Image (spheres, helix red, strand yellow):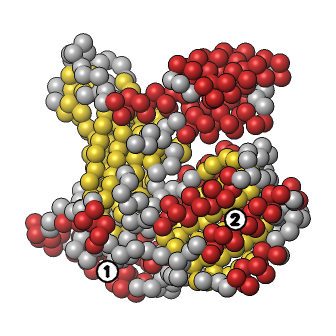
Amino acid sequence: MPDKTDFYRRLNIGTGASEEAIKKAYRLAVRKTHPDVNRNDGATQLFLDIQEAYKILSDPNRKGDYDQDRDPHDISSGILTAIEYSQEALLRLEEPQVIYSLVDIVSTKDEEQKSADLPLNISLVLDNSTSMKGPRLDILRAATKEIISDLGEDDLVSVISFNDRAKVLLTSQTQPSDVQVETALNDLYAEGGTEIFQGIEAGYEEIRKHPTLNYVNHIILITDGHTYGDEDNCIALANTAADQDIGISGLGIGIEWNDEFVDQLCALTGGQSLFVHDLEQVKEFLEHSVASLKEAFSRRLTLEVTPAPGVKMLSAFRILPEAIPLPIQENYSLGILKKHQPHRVLFEFLVDPIPGEIDRAVIVSGEFIIKKKIRDQVIPITLDRTLSSDIENLEPPPPEIFKAISHLTFYRLQEKAQQDIASGNPGTAYQRLLNLSSHLMAKGEDALAKIAMNEADYIKSHNNFSPTGKKQLKYGTMRLLLPEKT
């Protein structure tokens, strides 16, 4: 439910919103929260709160009185943000310039102690197409059984199998008996093709049987196949799931699955996407996914950003809690905010020449929205820099953002090599991978450097990546973006 003290948060608008923006936000909020379409607990009160907020904010006189009495800091206590930049100032140039920003948000221990833990509401969506036959399904059954047995007494779980159709093996419930789980998983056998939409839609419907406001909601997808013809439906469902605070994480087994598609699906909802070649890693993925969800301080963290005029966002990359490239957009679903760990995003902006003699320029304004059981918290952020003409005496970037940018370069080298192959330029891809291998070797990443060198040799003789090496390089360089554990 929106914070009882903040009408702007109820309508999801900033304090500078125009009358037209307030009306538009109100209409959108009403469509989403009307009790006829919102089945969550407290929907009626939510609807009434929005009506109350609109009555005040749509009346200029009452809005003025409200603004005068409003404490803008009340809703952001207990949350810390930290921002680093790739340069200490924007330069007065006659051409566009690139600047990076590393944005962290973390909860304090005091705030975590005041916050009630949220139970899980998860759906395990398991590919049982023909290609999963044998050891893959055997390991998946064993891992699923173990994960379910480790859930808490208030945690909800459902199990879905899918090929070209979906089947609910275990309906959403708390503490299913060993017999129920055994019976459900005995019905998990290999057949048919791969249509991911069938599986995630069934998982979504199981999660939606319960009020999502009261849980950390997540679909965990495991597949070894390449879905065909239903990608648009999957993306649409992922966007809907994000709006309902439901995340999606995906694990790809082997070499046949579509990593770009699964990455996109997960990035839209704040989940993670991983590749495993060793079947034993399936269990590790499930254990890590569920353990991470149990560390949730909030059921969802979102970020809304608006670039200033003359500023273009070039890229966004979530670094913590798990590394994944993000789409270019203004509203991000970033997943859960964990206890004891920051959420970190690396942004890249292109800034046009700044006119006039202003001393400070805004790059982006926005706000984090932390969605919790009792109320949401809003933390405004502004990315800005002073202007300078002194190019020679600028301080070097802080070590943390310098390292992040350097490691992002590794990821982009393999990404550009893939684009070279797609464009029919294997020679350029070959040179890029030689360059990548050299840089990785210099950084002490010998194993990954060897993979890059092997892929360069493979491209030289086959004019293409090897199916395994392509994914190993992609997810290996992505892993480098994660900060070293101390």
Residue 323 position, x and y percent, is 51, 45
Mark yes or no: residue 142 visible.
yes
Residue 65 left/right relative to 193 = left
Please name the residue shown 78% across and 36% down the image. Answer: 467
Check the image and report above or below for 445 versus 438: below
Q: Residue under circle 2? A: 143
Residue on which disc 1 sits? 49
Check disc 2 and give the amino acid type: Ala
Image quarter of the N terminus:
bottom left
Residue 403 percent coordinates (x, y)? 41, 30
Local packing at callout 2 (Cα closer than 10 Å; few below 14, some 14-19, many 20+) is some
Q: Nearer the viewer, mark 2 or mark 1?
A: 2
Quadrant that contains the C terminus: top left
Secondary element at image label 2: helix
- The image position of residue 250, as x and y in percent, is 64, 56
Image coordinates for residue 130, horizontal then vertical, percent = 88, 59
